[in-house]
Image (cartoon, grey):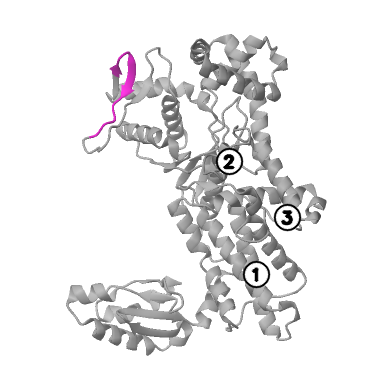
Amino acid sequence: MIKDIEEFIKPIFDSFNYDFYVSESNKKEICDYQINSLFRIAKELKVNLLEIGTTITKKINELKNFDEYFKEVSFLNGFINITISDKFINKWINKSLNNLGVNKVESDELYFLDYGGPNIAKPLHIGHLRPAIIGESLKRIINYKGYKTLSDVHLGDYGLQMGQVIYGIKRDKIKLEDININYLNKCYPEISALCKSYEKVYEECKNIVKELQNGNKEYNELWNKIYEESLKDIKRLYKYLDINFDLWLGESDSKPYISKLIDLLLQKQLLVEDDGAKIVKLQEENDNKEMPPLIVLKSDGSFMYATTDLATIYERIEKYNPKYILYVVDARQSLHFEQVFRTCKKIGWKNNFEHISFGTINGSDGKPFKTRSGETLKLDELIKMTKETFIQKREENADMNKEDLDIIVNAIIKYADLSNNREKNYVFDLSKFSDVNGKTGPYILYSALRIKKILENNTFDGTVSDKIYDDIDRNLRIKLLDFDKYITKSIEERLPSIIAEYVYDIADLTSTFYQKNNISNLQDKTNKNDWLIILNFAYNVMKECLNMLSIKIPSKM
């Protein structure tokens, strides 16, 4: 809409040889849009601000088709204030009915998203929630705008936990065919605790990892079985959460690229020996703090997490060459990614590398969420707790079918997370998030179902008339026309919370709209048809927003 306004009034500014732009007003009670360029124009050209402001405003008001665009244009305190006309709003509503006003891009730019990052042999817990939910949502938002995406779960399948579980299997004399998820869930925490208490066990587990990386046949056979059983469970939970990946690769898949990486680092003269280890120095002259070197190979020849990350990047660039590679990973890994990205720059890779960091999910004490016994809450337990909490809210909830209940559980968990700015920590208040009132997933779903019911009980067709009937109606229409703007902003800032906030605003405005107006019983056919079209527009926008947040709409609540 802004471009349309700018093109309409551009000849006036051109006649004075003035450059200008139209922006949204931050004071909606005064006007919809503003021209803020007059201060700069007056200063640069040394002309009187009041004189040019009054002259340009007068000429805009004298334009032949003024009413097609504006209700009022006035000059006040150095700003040209613009209130758009009902005709202009409705012209854009009608233009947007088929595509919801979203201008899809036609681009070959590829976004590669690395998110999820679960560890093989470890149960998924509440800490795995944010990377999966944020990453999936970002991917869907980017996709919806028309960009190409590729996503990879990037499994942690070569770390210390593999050595710990293999140690446990050998200690317990577990047969290959008896290795299952129940044993893995019991074994890992037990051996992990042993490693913290006994240095000898820790060193033995580390040695198992080194031998595994070097191709030990027995360990690789056990690794394959652990991988198979653990991956089945990971996929089960991600399927429940509707988290989908194009690639199910892990650290181990980068192994063929590690030798290529080391050759490249040697060729670029970046690899330096330091106390037996092979490192890349990263300190730069303008650094105001110490930047540790990146360790590629330890003194014993084993490689590090950073090594597999760089080898994985090598593979991704060679196979896909994405313009953007986004890592949705905890903010506490920021130093690691700064080291990796600096190394990529030194190598000469031109891709855009970004760490999409996020804060922690906290309990009421402000610390990372734990169970009452002090353990990290498993995802299975979180899902069960959420379901029980929602059912306790109303007796009727217990009678819901399983599919609808699972959809609502997903909405509770996901909206609670995505409605918060990803960069911040948030307190996980399950009772609050499960409520059908307030800024929650259930509230938005309930609003969507109310709209859907009105639409199913009435008929409508065509386009809206030139009329807008009240302020709530007008506010809703303008907000709906902002859909594309919020998608673009969400992509630019890498913040799904922008879409989460927007869909809540639409749900809230629409709820106020249909509660104030008894649409189904309206006698004025034009008014009724207009409002049903607007409700349908709002429902479709909400549905698309929820899908971008990986939230479905149940059949009933």
**Label 3 is placed on what type of residue?**
Pro
Asked if one can make out residue 315 in the rendered structure from this viewpoint, the answer is yes
Which sits in the foreground, 292 or 381? Answer: 381
Left or right position of 481 against 267: right
Residue 544 in percent (x, y) is at: 61, 58
- Residues drawn in magenta: 273-284
Disc 1 residue crowd, few under 14, some 14–19, many 20+, Cα 10 Å: some
Asked if one can make out residue 532 in the rendered structure from this viewpoint, the answer is no
- What residue is shown with label 3? 554
Residue 324 in percent (x, y) is at: 43, 43
Report the residue at 48% width, 22% height from top: 255
Sequence-wise, which precedes: disc 2 or disc 3?
2
Up-down relation of residue 402 to residue 162 (above or below): below
Report the residue at 27% width, 36% height from top: 289
Sequence-wise, which precedes: disc 2 or disc 1?
2
Question: Label 1 near label 3: C-beta < 8 Å?
Answer: no
Based on the picture, tell me whether residue 274 belongs to the magenta stretch.
yes
Label 3's element?
Answer: loop
